[in-house]
Image (spheres, rainbow, N blue to C red):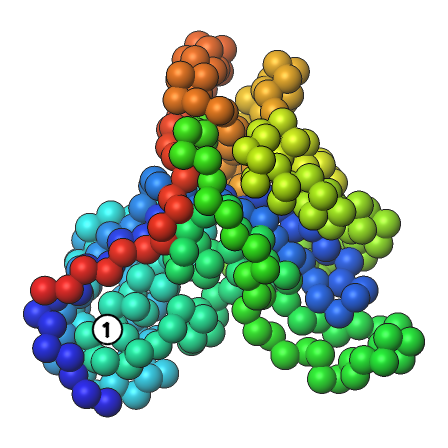
């Protein structure tokens, strides 16, 4: 290991939407499979310098310290870092704050100490990307992202028919990115946040996956077809109606599957009411990101997004609802050195 002569590293990354899983059945040897979008805001920004002792200041310092300490230990570093967290993504809101936090800190440490770690390696060291590869890909390249799910054990009877070795298919690697598109520059995303209710996370999330029943194979097949034959070509043709139909299919089936764990199709009753109203209005694309509670809707222009937001704010006046319009991030994270 050789120290790199940087006085300071600044790493910037942004939130992402997880729009849904399309194969929760896993019978073909891969499970989950995700579609998601990198956002321009909200974001994380941190600066880091080499230091003899670990020091963390700014936002979410306890969380950052835990991640940094974990990395320093696993990498067997004899020195540490001084971290200043200047900006963060809301935690447990379904926007990927945990993954982006881990990747920004890991990237800063890697650059400071000349470790040349790639994003997938940092994700593995910090335990990120076990089910979805969207956050990793969002950090690397941004845009509209589709991953192929992670390798998953299949029943021995099915494995023999497919000439697969069920024992060797259990390796937990980050899901591979199988498609990436620039999101249309004019399209805008309206975020609907509930700042009084966290989404399911941590041990609660693990318990939910263990207790939920086997996902129907026929619905998984339908959702895979929808992503391949609707969402993907719609991105090429910039067709929000077709893209939105695919996302709504994912949201309906996956949301209802997760309903026993999160209390309904949507985690927040307030965000859920807004999304149901958008459905009644005929909005093309809307849903909940990950386990929520953050909801989203996509519009073809800034003007339309502003129009709908003003109408929604007048109708839904609960003080815990926060509204934000943003664009997509088609470029991934940024690393600045001094």
Instruction: State whether residue 231 is above or below residue 11.
Output: above
Residue wearing tag 1: 111
Q: Position of residue 232 (x, y in %)?
A: 62, 44
Horizontally, residue 134 falls left or right of residue 87, namely: right
Picture layout, residue 27 above or below residue 221 = below
| Residue 172 seen in the current view | yes
Rendered-image quadrant of the N terminus: bottom left
- Residue depicted at 15% across the width and 64% down the height: 337
Left or right for 245, reference 115: right
Q: Residue at x 71, y 66 (%)?
A: 30
Foreground pick, 252 / 241 = 241
Label 1 CA crowd tier, 10 Å (few <14, some 14–19, many 20+) = many
Residue 276, picture quadrant? top right
The answer, for residue 265, to whether it is visible in the render is no
Number of numbered discs on residues: 1
Left/right placement of residue 152 relative to residue 275 reads right
**Local secondary structure at mark 1:** helix
Locate the C terminus and report the quarter of the image it occupies: bottom left
Residue 286 falls in image quadrant: top right
- Name which residue lies at 61% across and 14% down: 281
- Residue 182, horizontal then vertical, whole percent: 46, 44
Classify 237 as above or below 115.
above
The x and y percentages for residue 245 are 68, 32
| Residue 117: x %, y % from top left | 35, 77
């Amino acid at each position: 290991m050789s120290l790199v002569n940087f006085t300071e590293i600044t790493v910037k990354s942004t939130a992402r939407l997880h729009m849904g899983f399309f194969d929760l059945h896993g019978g073909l040897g891969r499970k989950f499979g995700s579609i998601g979008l990198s956002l321009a805001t909200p974001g994380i920004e941190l600066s880091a310098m080499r230091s003899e002792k670990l020091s963390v200041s700014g936002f979410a310092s306890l969380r950052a310290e835990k991640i940094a300490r974990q990395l320093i230990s696993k990498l067997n570093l004899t020195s540490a870092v001084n971290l200043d967290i200047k900006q963060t993504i809301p935690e447990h809101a379904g926007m990927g704050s945990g993954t982006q936090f881990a990747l920004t800190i890991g990237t800063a440490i890697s650059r400071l100490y000349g470790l040349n770690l790639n994003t997938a390696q940092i994700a593995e060291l910090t335990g990120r990307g076990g089910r979805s590869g969207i956050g990793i890909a969002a950090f690397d390249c941004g845009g509209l992202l589709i991953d192929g799910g992670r390798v998953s054990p299949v029943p021995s009877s099915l494995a023999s028919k497919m000439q697969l070795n069920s024992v060797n298919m259990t390796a937990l690697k980050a899901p591979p990115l199988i498609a990436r598109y620039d999101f249309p520059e004019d399209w805008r995303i309206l975020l609907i946040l509930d700042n009084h209710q966290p989404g399911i996370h941590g041990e609660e999330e693990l318990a939910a996956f263990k207790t939920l029943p086997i996902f129907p194979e026929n619905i998984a097949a339908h959702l895979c077809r929808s992503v391949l034959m609707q969402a993907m070509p719609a991105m090429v043709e910039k067709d929000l109606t077709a893209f939105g139909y695919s996302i709504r299919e994912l949201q309906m089936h996956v949301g209802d599957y997760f309903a026993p764990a999160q209390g309904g199709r949507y985690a927040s009753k307030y965000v859920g009411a807004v999304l149901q109203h958008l459905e009644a209005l005929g909005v093309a694309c809307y849903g909940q990101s990950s386990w929520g509670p953050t909801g989203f809707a996509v519009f073809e222009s800034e003007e339309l997004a502003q129009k709908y937001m003003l109408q929604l704010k007048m109708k839904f006046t609960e003080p815990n609802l926060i509204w934000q319009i943003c664009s997509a991030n088609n470029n991934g994270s940024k690393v600045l050195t001094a």
